Amino acid sequence: MRFSLNCGNDCPVSENPMLPLECLRPGEWAEICDVSGEPASVGRLAELGLRVGSQIQMLRGGSPCLIAIGGGRLSLRGDHHMQVYVRPISG
């Protein structure tokens, strides 16, 4: 079973395409528009602040990547069971 928190057309920066998180370069800011995968994983990421509408900054790319979110930092490993999509924004 897969679960998705897709914001559809509600993202305020609609002129930018939705990209996988791993496409962001260090220093770039983005808004999370979709988190999909196993319900437990999606729920855990939401508890950590990684949810639709959250703004993040990519600090270090790769696997694991390092992002800034909500005043903290979060390290994420590439996981084929889960996908995070973002829209780049001006920081």
Image: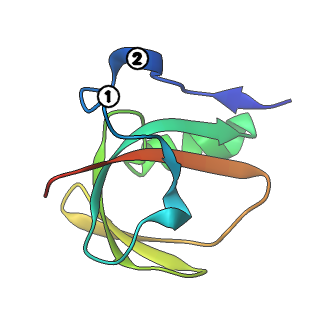
Quarter of the image where one finds residue 3? top right
Image quadrant in which the C terminus is located? bottom left
Residue 22 vertical position relative to residue 16 in the rendered view, above or below:
below
| Residue underneath mark 1 | 14
Q: 5 left or right of 12?
A: right
Q: Distance between the residues labelled 1 and 2?
A: 7 Å
Horizontal side, residue 52 vs residue 72: left or right: right
What amino acid does circle 2 point to? Asn
What residue appears at the point 50 percent right and 58 percent down from the top-left corner? 21
The relative height of residue 10 versus residue 12 in the rendered view (above or below) is above
Residue placed most toward the observer, 87 or 78: 87
* Quarter assignment of residue 56: bottom left
Q: Which residue is drawn at 47% across and 19% down?
A: 8
Residue 24: numbered disc: none
Q: Where is residue 65 in the image (x, y as percent from the top left)?
A: 50, 77
Identity of the residue drawn at 70% across and 34% down? 39
CB contact under 8 Å: marks 1 and 2: yes
Q: Name the residue under label 2.
A: 9
* Element type where label 2 sits in the image: helix
Q: What residue type is labelled 1?
A: Ser
Mark positioned earlier in the residue sequence (1 or 2): 2
The residue closer to the viewer here, 31 or 47, is 31
Q: Residue farthest to the left?
A: 91
Q: In percent of the image, x 51 and y 49: which residue is there?
A: 19
In this image, 56 relative to 84: left or right?
left
Left-right relation of 16 to 5: left
Residue 81 placed where, x, y %?
79, 52
Residue 62 position by quadrant: bottom right
Q: Alpha-carbon neighbours of circle 1 within 10 Å: few (<14), some, or many (≥20)?
A: few
